[in-house]
Image: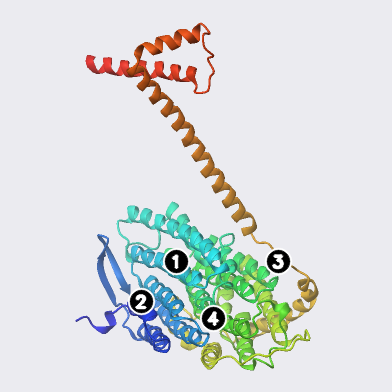
């Protein structure tokens, strides 16, 4: 019998996902909380270096490998999974939806604990499948968004698979330990673009705001966590020493994401753009590649999962209780949903990087790493994105909880399970903001150079907050007049649709033309062989104008093709006899 620590947590969570639809709702969700919470505890206590070697598809593989990076991801994936399952239960999610969500969690755990590229890609693709099913389960607009989501991730996964296969031909092994990241050249480009779909590289990001606002509110909580952060993990495996182009892409993501977020009126769409923006800090840290930058990137992975899930929880409560998703349709909710308002305020201060909250620590580590490496453009882009983040969440909080549109509501408080989930996660954002040393101890890289509570850093955080407040006041009126702002999908999707349709039509017409020529030639040969004298008769009739050479049926073309084909056939026969 295998020791308990050799039982991969992914398999436990997936087993619960499989039986979930057949269990009583309360028992099934309780089992889901235990499975995901157990995965978090397992990840924390499992001995370093634990691994399970195996043969997979005939290749040497490692099903499970515990190192600093995978341990951190397992702890936070399991922890937030437990909170999200509890939130789902109290949000009236059906067993089938939560089963898909647990499948999503399980495959994500499988990807981050894999010890080789082949196993990681296997779970990576399953993660895309399970998350698509989670989106589709809600029906309605989520179905078409789910198709677009599936196309994006299918293409991204295919590019990553191509990179991995090319890498294998160069290295001779899929194991992470066989080389220092993906081999240079074409494989690195393919891997960067393939993983870039998952993390939301600029131009590859539109699936985020397109998909995440559409499914059930509890499904959005799961979606906000796993795909993008597994992508950051994959990026760190592919580029363990950093890549400066990726660092600049991360800074661009942070800035462009926050600009689009600020212009949104739909709550979950705003939060989705902020996923791109905040993941930009992580991508920048991975790209910079120093010990401090890597530690900062994964500190931000951990912290972001906490406050972003909390933000989607608070938005979900608002939507469920009011039936409204647009900020301009809300207001004064602080009196109707006080616990939700408190949870939102904590999450907003965390994501914005206000001193005393967890985002302040991890964002500061990444910006400090950029400053130390004299990456001036990246440094200032990240600071500017910080100002935009304050502006975005001042806007969210003002319109949802403060502004008086003259509305009155008849809403119930959030459910008990929602309150427990939100306040538990909120307490962790404060805890890790005040006592970051407990997070530093499980980070990859090195947090030894991180000094979050220096006077300069605290002053910087307060200045960003002040600029964010002033900025919101200045742009509040223009923002209120904005309609829906188009993104690059306004170009990509029509181009892809009409381009694909034109390609299909062109190929179909070409095939039809070739088919007509071949069929006509074949009929001509058959007719000539069956009635050889008719060829001479028809030819004579054509040459003497006894018959119209251009009749329906293509007589002249048929005769010409028949003669040519007969000459070719006879020549081939003669050549065969001579040889």
Q: CA distance from mark 1 to mark 2?
A: 17 Å
- Between residues 4 and 458, which one lies in front from this camera angle? 4
Please, which colouring scheme is shown? Answer: rainbow
Mark 4, residue position: 309
Q: Is residue 333 left or right of residue 168?
A: right
Kindly state the secondary structure of the residue where label 3 is placed: loop
Kindly state the secondary structure of the residue where label 2 is placed: helix
Identify the image quadrant of residue 454: bottom right
Disc 1 vs disc 2: which is toward the camera?
2
Mark 2, residue position: 18
Q: Position of residue 86 (x, y in %)?
A: 47, 87
Identify the image quadrant of residue 480: bottom right
Q: Is residue 82 above or below residue 205?
A: below
Categorize mark 3 by other alpha carbons within 10 Å: few (<14), some (14-19), many (20+).
few
Q: CA distance from mark 3 to mark 2?
A: 40 Å
Q: Would residue 290 be seen by someone viewing this image from the given angle?
A: no
Label at residue 128 = 1
Kindly state the secondary structure of the residue where label 1 is placed: helix
Q: Residue at x 46, y 36 (%)?
A: 511
**Looking at the image, which residue sits at the far left?**
1
């Amino acid at each position: 019998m295998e020791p308990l620590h050799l039982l991969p947590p992914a398999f436990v969570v997936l087993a619960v996902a499989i039986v979930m639809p057949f269990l009583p709702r309360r028992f099934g969700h309780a089992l889901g909380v235990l499975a995901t919470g157990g995965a978090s505890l397992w990840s924390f206590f499992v001995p370093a270096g634990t691994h399970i070697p195996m043969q997979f598809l005939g290749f040497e593989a490692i099903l499970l490998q515990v190192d600093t990076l995978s341990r951190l991801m397992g702890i936070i994936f399991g922890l937030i999974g437990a909170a999200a399952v509890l939130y789902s239960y109290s949000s009236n999610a059906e067993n089938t939806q939560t089963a898909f969500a647990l499948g999503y969690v399980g495959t994500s755990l499988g990807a981050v604990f894999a010890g080789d590229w082949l196993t990681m890609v296997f779970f990576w693709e399953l993660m895309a499948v399970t998350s698509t099913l989670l989106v589709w389960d809600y029906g309605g607009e989520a179905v078409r968004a789910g198709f677009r989501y599936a196309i994006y991730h299918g293409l991204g996964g295919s590019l990553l698979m191509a990179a991995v296969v090319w890498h294998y031909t160069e290295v001779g092994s899929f194991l992470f330990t066989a080389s220092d990241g993906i081999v240079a050249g074409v494989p690195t480009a393919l891997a960067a673009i393939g993983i870039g779909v998952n993390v939301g590289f600029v131009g590859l990001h539109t699936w985020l705001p397109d998909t995440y606002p559409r499914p059930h509110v509890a499904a959005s909580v799961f979606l906000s966590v796993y795909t993008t952060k597994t992508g950051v993990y994959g990026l760190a495996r592919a580029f363990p020493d950093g890549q400066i182009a990726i660092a600049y892409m991360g800074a661009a993501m942070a800035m462009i994401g926050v600009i689009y977020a600020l212009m949104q009126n739909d709550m979950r769409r705003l939060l989705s753009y902020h996923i791109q923006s905040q993941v930009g800090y992580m991508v920048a840290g991975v790209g910079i590649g120093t010990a401090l930058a890597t530690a900062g990137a994964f500190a931000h992975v951990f912290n972001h999962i906490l406050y972003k899930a909390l933000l989607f929880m608070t938005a979900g409560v608002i939507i469920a209780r009011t039936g409204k998703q647009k900020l301009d349709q809300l207001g004064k909710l602080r009196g109707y949903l006080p616990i939700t308002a408190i949870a939102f305020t904590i999450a907003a201060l965390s994501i914005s990087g206000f001193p005393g909250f967890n985002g302040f620590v991890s964002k500061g580590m990444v910006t400090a790493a950029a400053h130390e490496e004299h990456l001036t453009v990246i440094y200032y882009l990240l600071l500017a994105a910080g100002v935009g983040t304050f502006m975005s969440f001042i806007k969210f909080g003002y319109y949802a909880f403060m502004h008086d549109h003259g509305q009155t509501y008849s809403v119930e408080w959030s459910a008990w399970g929602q309150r427990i989930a939100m306040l538990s996660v909120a307490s962790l954002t404060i805890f890790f903001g005040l006592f970051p040393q407990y997070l530093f101890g499980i980070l990859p890289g090195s947090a030894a150079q991180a000094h979050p509570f220096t006077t300069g850093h605290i002053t910087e955080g307060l200045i960003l907050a002040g600029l964010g407040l002033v900025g919101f006041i200045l742009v509040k009126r223009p923002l209120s007049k904005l309609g829906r702002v188009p993104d690059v999908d306004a170009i990509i999707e029509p181009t892809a649709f009409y381009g694909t349709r034109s390609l299909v039509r062109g190929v179909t017409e070409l095939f039809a033309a070739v088919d007509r020529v071949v069929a006509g030639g074949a009929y001509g040969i058959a007719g000539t062989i069956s009635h050889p004298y008719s060829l001479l008769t028809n030819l004579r009739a054509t040459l003497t104008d006894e018959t119209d050479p251009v009749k329906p049926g293509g007589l002249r073309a048929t005769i010409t093709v028949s003669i040519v084909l007969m000459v070719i056939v006879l020549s081939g026969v003669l050549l065969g006899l001579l040889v």
